[in-house]
Structures are given as structure tokens and as C-alpha cells.
Amino acid sequence: MLREKSGDISHISLYDRENRNSWFLVKRYYAMNFDFFDMEPHSHGEFEIMYIASGCCTIYSWTADGTEKVWRMKEGEYVMIDGGTWHKLEVVKGVRCRILNLEIALLPRPGGNGGKTIEQLREQSKSLRDFLALPTSIYKCYDGEGTLHTIITETHKQLQNPMEAGEHRVMQNLCLAQLLVELSRQRSKKYRSDGGSKYVSRTLSFLNSNYEKDIKVEDIAAKIGVSAAYLQRLFKEQTGKTLVDKINELRIEKAKVLLETSSLPVTDIAISVGFHNRQHFTYTFRKLTGCSPSVYSKHKGDYQVWAFK
């Protein structure tokens, strides 16, 4: 049973545009060896990294509607948990597990401190732009080359190094900026290998069902849960085509069927597959097929008849 939240902490999400001018400060951290642990479900305002340095454990998380997710973790894997997300850690008795942890607050940027804000990093890093376009309460990833482990370890060392308070905050911010960029790189790589295919597949399914409608890229992106800019880049990378090109291709394929099998006027066919006027339809049809809709209709799609005209 989840404990009731104390206060509204919804505003601390790393993905929230209102936090783009925030910078970072570690509120809590640890590196601990567990051979048994059963944490109470809880949430807090900081986003959190749990990195499994050795052994294995289980992490539970809950969505806003109470749906439970179970994450089986092993060495080299980690989760990033957004602020305000309910979660708990469980280490089974007798199973040794070493965990590196960082709980990171988003703070308004003090003037003249020299630290990097989320927005400044986002402007300079494509991976971070993609990362922020894929909001999620928790995700799991694998640190294949150990880069993130090194950054977290160095951050822990820096946190234990006493220095003047202002200087300490700046050093933390720089370490955590490096951490966030590396998290973004690893997540972008993961989504391009598996999650990216999922988003492209959902997009294609949506287009096949809605090709005749007045489709906007923003509508597709909202439907599948990513930003329009990210979806356009991902779709182009994985299919070699822009979303507009793919929509036109689908519409022309549907139009070809109608031209071959029906006696509808060309203008009616154009409108039925999603074009606003005959001129645009004719231009696009000729561009993709090499002939006009009228010629195609006359020969019922027989390419060898009209290919040499």
C-alpha cells in the first residue's frame, strides 16, 4: 500500500519545460552493499539514479493511477526515476547487491554562478533534446561501457571533497551536467535500437488508419507520446523517408487502387484519399508514379502500357 503523498511535487519533473532554467544539486547519495533490504514505497521531489554495481535486486514503481511495474536489475544496469514517482527497492536476503545512488534536485539558477542550466545543455546536445522529448516516470538501461559508472563514482568523490560552498555547488553542477548528457546518449542509443522501432511502428499503424484525414505531425506525436521534432528525426533515420513523404506515398497507393477498380472521377478520388484539390493530387501522383492519374486510370495501372509514353 502506498503512503499518501505529502504536498504537491508534480512540478519537479526533469521533463517539465518550466524547469528548463534549473540547474542541479545532489540532495542525497550513497554507495552501499546490501544483503537484505525491503524499502517502504515512497516518492520525493528529486530525480534519482540507482546503479547496480554488482549483484542483483528488484525495483518496483507505480504510475499515477497505481499501476505497478517490476524491474529486475543486474550488474551494470540502472534506472532513472523522475521526481514524484512512487518506487521501492528490494534486495532478497542472501543475495548481495552493491548500489550507487544519486538523488538530484532541480534548483532555480542563482545569478552568475557559472553552472549549466538544463536549457543550455539541451541547446548544445542533440541526445539531451531527444531525451527530454521522451518523458517517462522511470526507465531502465544498461551501461555497456561502464562510462556512467565512472561518472557516478567521480561525482561521489567530488561530493566528499570539502570546499567553499559556492564552489562546491558549481563543481556538483558540472559533474551532473556530464552525467545527464551521458544518460541521454545511452537512452537515445537504446530507443534507436528497440524503443525507436516501437514508435515508428505505432506511427505507421496510425498513418494506415488515418491517411485520408488532415494529419499534422504534432497530432501523430501526441498520439504516440513523443515530441514532433523527435518523431520526425526518428522516422527519417529508420525509414529513409519524411513523415510527409510517407503520408503522400500511402495516399497515392490507396488512390491507385481506386483508379484501377472504380469509376469515380479523379477529383473525388483525390479528396477521398486526403488531398484538398486535384492539382496537388495530380502533381504528387505524377511525382511518385511517373504518369498522371488519368493515364493510370485509362490503363488500369498497367505500367508496361504507359511507361514508354
Image: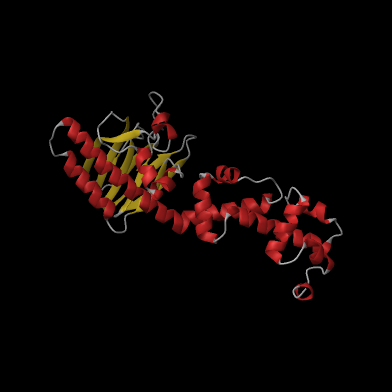
Residue 165 sits in quarter: top left
Marker count (numbered): 0
Could you tell me which quadrant the N terminus lies in? top left
Image spot of residue 242 (x, y percent): 57, 55
| In this rendering, position of residue 184 left or right of residue 276 | left
Which is nearer the eye, 115 or 103? 115
Q: Is residue 123 above or below residue 5?
A: below
Q: Residue furthest right?
A: 263
| In this rendering, position of residue 62 left or right of residue 91 | right
Could you tell me which quadrant the C terminus lies in? bottom right
Residue at x-position 32% and y-position 50% = 182
Residue at x-position 40% and y-position 43% = 138
Residue at x-position 67% and y-position 56% = 248
Which is nearer the eye, 165 or 196? 165
Residue at x-position 51% and y-position 60% = 238
Image spot of residue 141 (x, y percent): 37, 52
Q: Is residue 106 above or below residue 74?
A: above
Q: Is residue 137 visible?
A: yes
Image spot of residue 49 (x, y percent): 31, 43
Image spot of residue 286 (x, y percent): 72, 62
Q: Residue furthest left?
A: 162
Q: Is residue 97 visible?
A: no
Which is nearer the eye, 94 or 82? 82
Identify the colour scheme used: secondary structure
| In this rendering, position of residue 43 left or right of residue 232 | left
Which is nearer the eye, 97 or 43? 43
